[in-house]
Image: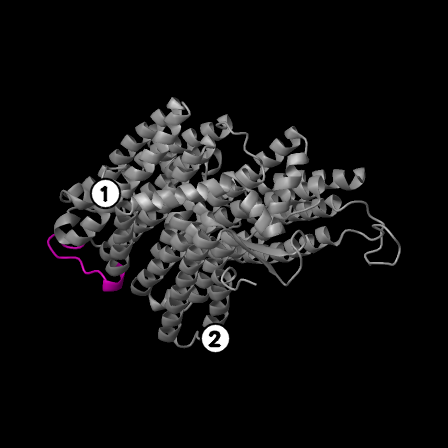
């Protein structure tokens, strides 16, 4: 039995339980939470190394044989996702130590956060459709608590939408699992990949589309994204950052996993997914342009970026999937870093509304630099990780002659630059005029800090944001080996025999 | 396949969807609960015919009912129970904060509403 595979799930879950007991000693609880995240990160890296050298590893928890038991599987794709997600989770937790006040932290922030980590890890590792549902629920239930942490009016309003939408998706998920079970008599994904091939083609397509809908709600793809830009910005900023970086990407992971493993790819680009991808990119970026609040602009950008990942999947080629995997890795790191910077601005100045900010480049040059690097990377400027990711996707698209989606993706990149420069021009350059200082009816009146003073930012916040920005630069520097790794992971996704034999033996 | 149960699943889904589209939070919560029941019932229907004993007997062949969908439905019920409890708490909190049991407009709706009011004046 391979102990390493369940470790990224078990470790944070046990730590969460223990963390509840430490509720009275906040400092100890903080240190414990960070320690647990470091442990999970170490376990994930060890798992990636193991999968890289030894191939797909599968574990049957409880000792029941494969199709009926609880299966955990780690292949290259899930191991990569685990490493990136736990790295981001650790950085955000360190950031939260500086940002959250004791009142928020005493509301069981640390235990719930660790449960969230366990849920995310479980989603990446599970080899069973129903346990994927359970893992999603672990993650989502923790996210319900985190998004409403503090229980202010705006949070309750946004949280209500978020919870209801997520529950509808979960209900559809259970219904989908029921239908799949009725059609095949199994919920084990390796088993399903063989059984679903025997199911009539139109029934298989209907089931496939149902799962695209279910995960599409969680991943915020085109017609189903409307809840995201409203729900995310109200939460405390570390929570928003980790949601923005991770939760939608877990949905994307589930789409890629189910579409490649279960609903056998036909070997040519999927028109439905390409249309979804293009529409997601365009609508997301247009929404971002219309906004005036840093967090809302960035939230719409999540939607837009999801389109690129779906585009990579929709091409259904080795290069497309490799590009999508590389894009996810790049996006998780960069997006989280951007939200952390937005959180720093909000903490230091008291607002994230562009109309009430100006001249931060003089008052906090380091913060400006920390914003500029991931912003340029998100837009896809050459030396940064976003450029490599987009280049991979564009090349993959041209290889199979999908010029339209490539054109759309490049146009959306231009609009991304436009809205990033809007944040830059609004928050970092210029000075406030008298008219702009006067509060809009939307915003709560707050004293605007004097223009010349340097901003005070807690060092842990700067440190963890800088670490993430450095990580995104490292992704750009190590783009060659990382892309090769993504290609090997994509090869595993397209050829499912290794996965199936590892699970079913 | 039991047609009655299948029809019941359909009815539960449609009633749940109808309630979900209402403006009152309590109705939304009840709608979510009904949708959950529909999905769980669907799992049970997927498990095959009713009427077989839920026990493993000595008779040859599949004489007992398939236990897996029941286990799945049980798990889903427990999860839905927790989620609905949380949803009720949120609805209560919303009632305490705003004094009414209704879904509020989101920020965009309010902004557009203000623009429309401004245009009218």
Q: Chain of mark 2?
A: A
Q: Nearer the viewer, residue A254 or A341?
A: A254
Q: Residue furthest right?
A: B59
Residue B10 position, x and y percent, is: 70, 38
Say if residue B115 shows up in the picture.
Answer: no
**Percent coordinates x, y for residue B14 in the rendering:** 66, 38
- Magenta residues, start to end: A449-461
The local secondary structure at tag 1 comes to helix
Examine the structure image and report whether residue A276 is included in the region drawn in magenta. Answer: no
Q: Which mark is residue A21?
A: 2
Which is more N-terminal, label 2 or label 1? 2
The subunit letter for the residue under badge 1 reads: A
Graded by Cα atoms within 10 Å as few (under 14), some (14 to 19) or many (20 or more), the crowding at tag 2 reads few
Q: Is residue A457 magenta?
A: yes
> In the image, which disc is placed on residue A355?
1
Q: At 67% across and 59% down in the image, what residue appears?
A: A64
């Amino acid at each position: 039995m391979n102990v390493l595979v369940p470790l990224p799930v078990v470790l944070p879950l046990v730590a969460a339980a223990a963390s509840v007991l430490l509720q009275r000693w906040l400092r100890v609880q903080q240190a414990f939470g960070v320690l647990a995240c470091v442990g999970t990160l170490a376990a994930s890296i060890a798992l990636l190394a193991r999968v890289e050298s030894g191939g797909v590893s599968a574990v049957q928890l409880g000792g029941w044989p494969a199709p009926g038991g609880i299966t955990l599987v780690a292949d290259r794709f899930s191991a990569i996702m685990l490493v990136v997600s736990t790295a981001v989770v650790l950085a955000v937790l360190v950031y939260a130590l500086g940002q959250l006040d004791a009142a928020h932290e005493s509301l069981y922030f640390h235990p719930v956060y660790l449960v969230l980590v366990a849920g995310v890890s479980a989603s990446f590792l599970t080899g069973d459709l129903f346990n994927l549902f359970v893992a999603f629920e672990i993650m989502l239930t923790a996210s319900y608590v985190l998004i409403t942490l503090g229980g202010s009016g705006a949070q309750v309003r946004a949280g209500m939408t978020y919870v209801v939408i997520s529950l509808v998706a979960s209900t559809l998920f259970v219904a989908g699992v029921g239908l799949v079970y009725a059609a095949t008599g199994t919920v084990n994904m390796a088993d399903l990949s063989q059984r679903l091939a025997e199911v009539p083609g139109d029934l298989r397509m209907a089931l496939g589309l149902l799962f695209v809908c279910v995960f599409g709600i969680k991943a915020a793809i085109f017609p189903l994204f409307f809840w995201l830009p409203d729900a995310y910005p109200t939460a405390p900023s570390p929570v928003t950052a980790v949601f923005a970086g991770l939760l939608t990407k877990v949905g994307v992971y589930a789409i890629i996993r189910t579409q490649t493993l279960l609903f056998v790819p036909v070997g040519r680009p999927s028109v439905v997914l390409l249309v979804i991808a293009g529409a997601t990119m365009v609508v997301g970026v247009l929404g971002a342009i219309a906004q005036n609040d840093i967090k809302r602009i960035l939230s719409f950008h999540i939607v837009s970026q999801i389109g690129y990942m779906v585009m990579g999947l929709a091409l259904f080629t080795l290069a497309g999937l490799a590009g999508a995997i590389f894009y996810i890795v790049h996006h998780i790191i960069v997006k989280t870093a951007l939200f952390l910077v937005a959180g720093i601005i909000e903490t230091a100045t008291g607002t994230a509304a562009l109309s009430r900010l100006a001249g931060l480049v003089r008052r906090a040059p380091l913060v400006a630099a920390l914003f500029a690097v991931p912003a340029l990377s998100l837009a896809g400027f050459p030396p940064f990780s976003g450029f490599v990711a987009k280049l991979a996707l564009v090349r993959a698209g041209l290889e199979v002659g999908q010029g339209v989606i490539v054109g759309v993706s490049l146009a959306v990149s231009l609009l991304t630059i436009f809205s990033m420069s809007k944040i830059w021009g609004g928050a970092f350059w210029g000075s406030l005029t008298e008219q702009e200082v006067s509060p809009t009816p939307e915003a709560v009146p707050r004293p605007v800090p004097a223009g010349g003073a340097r901003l005070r930012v807690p060092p842990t916040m700067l440190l963890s944001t800088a670490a993430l920005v450095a990580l995104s630069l490292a992704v750009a520097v190590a783009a060659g080996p990382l892309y090769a790794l993504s290609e090997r992971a994509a090869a595993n996704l397209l050829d499912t025999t290794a996965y199936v034999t590892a699970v079913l033996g | 396949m039991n047609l009655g149960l299948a029809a019941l699943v359909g009815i539960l889904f449609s009633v749940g969807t109808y309630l979900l589209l209402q403006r009152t939070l309590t109705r939304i919560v009840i709608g979510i609960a009904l949708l959950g029941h529909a999905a769980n019932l669907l799992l049970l229907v997927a498990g095959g015919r009713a009427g077989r004993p839920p026990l493993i007997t000595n008779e040859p062949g599949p004489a007992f009912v398939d236990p897996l969908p029941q286990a799945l439905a049980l798990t889903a019920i427990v999860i839905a129970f927790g989620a609905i409890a949380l949803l009720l708490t949120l609805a209560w909190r919303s009632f305490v904060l705003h004094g009414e049991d209704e879904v509020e407009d989101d920020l965009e709706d309010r902004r557009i509403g203000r623009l429309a009011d401004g245009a009218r004046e």
